Image (cartoon, coloured by chain):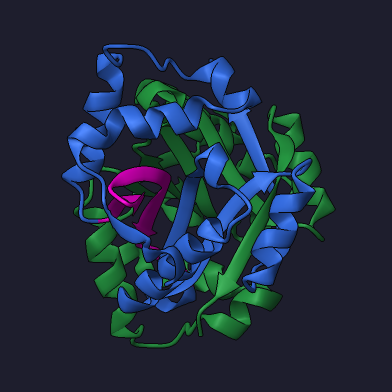
Chain colours: A blue, B green
Amino acid sequence: MAHDLVLRLARRDDLPSIVRMLADDDLGSQRERYEEPLPESYYAAFDKIDSDSNHELIVAELNGGVIGTLHLMFLPSLSFQGGLRAQVESVRVDKPYQGKGIGSDMMRWTIERAKERDAHIVQLTTHKSREDAHRFYERLGFKGSHLGMKLSLR
Amino acid sequence: MAHDLVLRLARRDDLPSIVRMLADDDLGSQRERYEEPLPESYYAAFDKIDSDSNHELIVAELNGGVIGTLHLMFLPSLSFQGGLRAQVESVRVDKPYQGKGIGSDMMRWTIERAKERDAHIVQLTTHKSREDAHRFYERLGFKGSHLGMKLSLR
């Protein structure tokens, strides 16, 4: 892996760094609350994620600093003869580190991790308008075969 | 709910009915194995799903027969201030019962169930070619805002 990047499970004390990255774009700034101290709801969600072996909240560390995050989840399913699905959500690379191949390294690590756990597929959704992201994932082998539909309940 | 439809958690002995529906289309027939006895991998996946309170494998029953299924999952997440996501996979209505509003009833039940569990969103993906499905979900309030990307590992 280039850049001496370390991918590891997130710890509770990584949460401010992670939430800062989630909040640091147009959509995120509307829906997240990056403040000191962090709202308790983030810690409550972290504890649920951290205690569930089907969830791996990952951070990318470079020279001791957290510069990326993603949430990898494993979804047991009946389809594909009871095959396990891997799903990726909330992929972020800190702005000063974008465009340097960090995201590709994170996704290649993720794909290997999904294979280790014997998932048959990795799936994710990205906003239709993010054509740069579509090309990024296509270069990694993903195919944009599906429409991702969402119903907000709030 | 019309049709005296009953939505309930699936039991182990519902599996043959569920797998039959999963296998009963062009894509499903290529990837599923509906045979007697069912491959053990389906039972193993069922046991994982059934023992995880974040997963609800649902069947729709009409006059004592299983005529529909869906897999509702709840995904803890940091985004949206640690909000819970609901995701729906593997929605099927048995062919003789399609076009009678059964699917709408199943999805309306699912949306209510997601609200009960305090999810802030319901998300799903459907194949881009399935324009009838897109319209179906749009009528229920879903917006096709995302591209669903998949990487097969086999």
User: What x and y, as percent, mark residue A125?
Assistant: 61, 50
Residue A151 falls left or right of residue B60? right
* The one of B140 and A134 positioned closer to us in this rendering: A134
Q: Quadrant of the N terminus of chain B?
A: top right
* The one of A117 and A11 positioned closer to us in this rendering: A11
Residue furthest toward the front? A63
User: What x and y, as percent, mark residue A40?
Assistant: 24, 16
User: What x and y, as percent, mark residue A70?
Assistant: 42, 48
Chief SS of the magenta region: strand
B93, above or below B139, in the image: below
Q: Residue at x 29, y 53 (%)?
A: A56
Q: Residue at x 70, y 27 (%)?
A: B141
A112, above or below A43, in the image: below
Magenta residues span: A54-79
Residue A152 falls left or right of residue A8? right
B119, above or below A144, in the image: above
